Amino acid sequence: MSLWARVNQLPQPVLEQIRYIYGNSFPIEVRHYLAEWIEDRLLNVPVYQHEQDSAYEQEAATFLNQLINELERTAINLPEDNVTGRIRLNESARNFRQLFSHNPVQLYSHLINCLQRERQCIAYPEECVNVQDPEIAEVINGLQQLQMLVRANENDNRNLVKDYEHLLLEIHEITKNKAQMEGIDNAQLREHARAALAQQERNVNETVTLITGKRLNLVDNFRKTIQLTSQVQEKVLHKYLTQWKINQGFAGNGASGMSASNLDTIQAWCENLAEIIWNTKDQIRLAMKNKSKLNIEEPNLPDFLPQSLVEVTNLLKSLITTTFIIEKQPPQVMKTNTRFAATVRLLIGNTLNIRMSNPLVRVSIISEAQAQATQQSNKASEQSCGEIMNNTGNLEYNETTKQLSVSFRNMQLKKIKRAEKKGTESVMDEKFALLFQSSFAVGHGDLVFSVWTISLPVVVIVHGNQEPQSWATITWDNAFADINRVPFHVPDKVSWNLLAEALNTKFRASTGRSMTPENMHFLCEKAFRASLQYPVSNDLTITWSQFCKEPLPDRTFTFWEWFYAAMKVTREHLRGPWNDGSIVGFIHKSKAEDYLLKCPRGTFLLRFSDSELGGITIAWVNESNDGQPQILHIQPFTAKDFATRSLSDRIRDFEDLFYLYPNKPKNEAFDRYTTPPGQPRNRNYIPSEVRAVLMPSNNNPISYPNTPNSYGHLQSPDASRDTPTSGYETLFWT
């Protein structure tokens, strides 16, 4: 059964959540009609990739072209009576071509994340029923209430303008009557005119009192509108947009899934707020203008209009400056002279005429100290500690997506100026950030705003061997940075359980499958260099130094370097068997031996080597000459070995390995990943192939039962890679 078929059997609330994560840019009908086609191509693709890699971009571009072709083909093959389906699929093909041709990675990564979320919902449906957040309802209700208030204020202000006009006419009439009265000679007529004039003045005073009451009521409604706008805006910006920004850091560690509200929803809220604030600002200015026209002093009544105008302008400033965000973060480990990309977006770009000016955005790289100074002064720094090529672009409005954004696709960091190091700090510990800044006028140009935003921290490297430690710095920062911190402070000590969750997220995103609780406990004991009770207490903490600075006992590498190497070799060479559960990986050597001693000869399991970075070894059950079971360990294989022959091919070559622990025939576990025999390049030659065989090492001159020990004199092809583990080595024959 396809993944999509199983998804459609889930409870309705879960289905609604899944439909929500696909968003407006990917119609759910496309997922339905192309279910198996999409799953065949994306289901086993890892969630986390270096999106700036040319190979990844090429994969995304190829997928997009194939998707568009498949949509058009499927639309043609739909039954003739399914007109709606045909229209929808053809429309989707056109939209995909228009929206994503310049950035296919955006669609590719989005779909991979969506499929990952579907898998999570199937595995844990009860956890995916996201009960409606009552605060979301508060935001929606608040916006609706504000829109009604604004309409009422507009209507009251309009009526008040008419009242002002009538009042001014009456005042003008009184002035005219006064002048006429002075010219009346007849005393009786003059007295009658004076009485009429007095009545007119009484009427005018009553009208002034009535208008004053209406104006004060309008001012009070302005204040209520501003107060409610402030409350709603606080929730939108400092709860939902802030959470979205926090999730960006988690996503840097490979986290997937949806947040409480996606960015398009937040943008819709922000655009509504911008219109409400701007309309209120205009209404306040109109009320101030009309009051000045009347020129009536109200000594006993405070004038709240100027203060209200200041408050609403501050709300507008906060909204504009906060909604200038980095939609696609730059790579957090950045290599000099290497192309990278980033995207910034202004969430209120569809309002206030901002999109008409296509504001210029400039990018610079700043140090940690410069980031702190920028945050403290709330002004973008003119300083830079490096040189970035192709670092300017204009915000452009997309009519289809309704977004005002700019994508920088070809930036390169040419130079970097580093700070002086303290103590044991290295270049891989030093954090920088990209600073994006712009300025533009809003409305009719009467207000100009300067906006800026800082990226997640980046570590700048010049060589690939600096990557592992750099990713330690970034992983720790993404997992434990507080949103309101001083850039880029992080705690020196954290809960192990929180770190374990971050490591598991990163491993799952990189390889496609989570670690088991037993795997996680093994990592805990490895990190702390001790045996610990399961499960470990939430009070157990680990320091930054233990995580990635102090070497493991009797080793030249740290815990992080060991973990990173295991993750890398799994992602690049072992993804299929790992996702199938055929690799235990994270297990103590002694525990692996305990498991295997209970199994028949030829049973084996796969574990990551303790002594060799990025090495995986095979532990298996053999029989000694006296017939007793003996556990042997084959020399670890690394990425260099897998470049020659895959793990699955090697396991097939080893004729003495029969069952994958506990009792699965090895062909069932690994045959799907073995390399099929290729055609000879030249029919005039006899074909040959590389194969791996087991050969006893000098430390283990063990014969198979009833088999002469005829290979004891053979040596390892690479003795420098021998490990303290006694076991079998491999020899290649062609």
Image (spheres, rainbow, N blue to C red):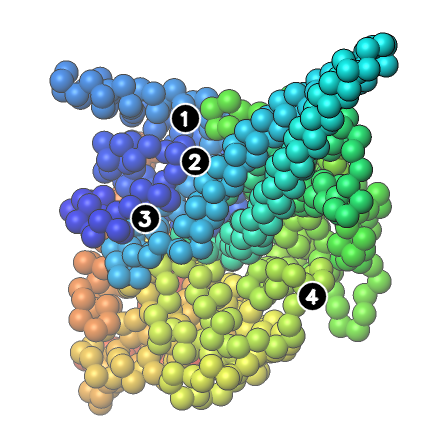
Q: Which mark is residue 107?
A: 2
Tell me which numbered mark, 1 or 4, is placed earlier along the sequence. 1
Tell me which numbered mark, 4 or 3, is placed earlier along the sequence. 3
Mark 4 element type: loop
Q: Is residue 731 above or below residue 299?
A: below
Q: Quadrant of residue 181?
A: top right
| Image location (x, y in percent) of residue 383 | 84, 46
Along the line of sight, the residue nearer the viewer: 104 or 622: 104
Which is more foreground, mark 4 or mark 2? 4
Residue marked by disc 1 = 96
Q: CA distance from mark 4 to mark 3?
A: 35 Å
For label 2, the crowd category at 10 Å Cα-Cα, with few meaning under 14, some 14 to 19 and many 20 or more, is many
Asked if the residue at tag 4 contacts the one at tag 1, i.e. Cβ–Cβ closer than 8 Å, the answer is no
Residue marked by disc 3 = 17
Q: Is residue 255 left or right of residue 79?
A: right
Along the line of sight, the residue nearer the viewer: 131 or 160: 160
For label 4, the crowd category at 10 Å Cα-Cα, with few meaning under 14, some 14 to 19 and many 20 or more, is few
| Image location (x, y in percent) of residue 402 | 51, 28
Residue drawn 67% across the image and 28% down it? 203
Asked if the residue at tag 3 contacts the one at tag 1, i.e. Cβ–Cβ closer than 8 Å, the answer is no
Q: Is residue 607 left or right of residue 300?
A: left
Mark 1 element type: helix
Residue marked by disc 4 = 489
| Image location (x, y in percent) of residue 367 | 77, 54
Asked if the residue at tag 2 contacts the one at tag 1, i.e. Cβ–Cβ closer than 8 Å, the answer is yes
At label 1, the amino acid type is Phe
At label 3, the amino acid type is Gln
Q: CA distance from mark 1 to mark 3?
A: 23 Å
Which is more foreground, mark 1 or mark 3? 3
Residue drawn 67% across the image and 37% down it? 209
Q: Is residue 188 above or below residue 103?
A: above
